[in-house]
Amino acid sequence: MLPQFEPVVPGHCIILPLQHESATRIADGGAWEEIRNFKKCLLKMFAQHGKDVIFLQTVVALAKQRRHCMIECIPVPCEVSHKAPMYFKKAIDEAEEEWSPHESKKLIPTSGDLRQVIPENFAYFRVEFGLDRGFVHVIDDESKFSAGFGLDVIKGVLRLPAQDMHRHRRRAPVDDQK
């Protein structure tokens, strides 16, 4: 789907499963495969334009079951996507001091199936660079974690103007995005 807010870059889209699940971590095998297939298609489509895709997912408020599983898909130039893991690692390491009341494993490298890395009812932030590599961070204190963290890091990686980093996202009409 198209984002309800102003896209970060042209082509910014969202994968939103039809089933109401709060996270890909708890989606069934069929939904998991369908999400993976959508990711493959987006990667292939953007590769034709010299771009790679970074996938972001923030999962919070699992106990309330109000949020729907949503994966932000941000197309970026390939030279940017190669540097992105370093930016995300640094941002998570620096912010960890604010988020976590105790010393825990800050960043867990992932490849493939998230279900083997994170227990079912944990809040987390996940970033993927393509299909087979990424990071996941377990969110200890949801009240201290910004839901826009991943998009803020992407904006930094893309060197978007500073005013874009801290302003509230504006709604974007679907017709304008089309």
Image: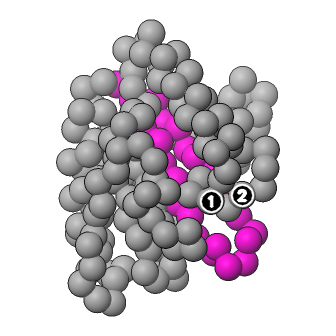
Residue 3 vertical position relative to residue 81 in the rendered view, above or below: below
Query: Which quadrant of the view contains residue 32?
Result: top right
Residue 95 is a magenta residue: no
Query: Which quadrant of the view contains residue 131?
Result: top left
As measured in the structure, the alpha-carbon distance from the residue carrying label 1 to the one carrying label 2 is 7 Å
- Is residue 141 something one can see in this rendering? yes
Residue 103, how many percent across, how many down? Answer: 24, 84
Residue 41, how many percent across, how many down? Answer: 56, 21
- Name which residue lies at 75% across and 69% down: 66
Instruction: Give the magenta range.
Output: 54-77
Query: Which quadrant of the view contains residue 48?
Result: top left
Residue 96, how many percent across, how many down? Answer: 29, 74
- Name which residue lies at 78% across and 56% down: 20
**Residue kind at label 1, given as amino acid type:** Ile
**Residue kind at label 2, given as amino acid type:** Glu
Q: Are marks 1 and 2 in contact (CB under 8 Å)?
A: yes
Other residues around mark 2 within 10 Å, as few (<14) / some (14–19) / many (≥20) = many
- Name which residue lies at 58% across and 28% down: 37
Residue on which the image places disc 2:
21
Q: Which mark is residue 26?
A: 1
- Is residue 164 something one can see in this rendering? no
Helix, strand or loop at label 1? It is helix
Residue 61 is a magenta residue: yes
Location of the N terminus by quadrant is top right
Residue 69, how many percent across, how many down? Answer: 66, 54
- Name which residue lies at 23% across and 67% down: 93
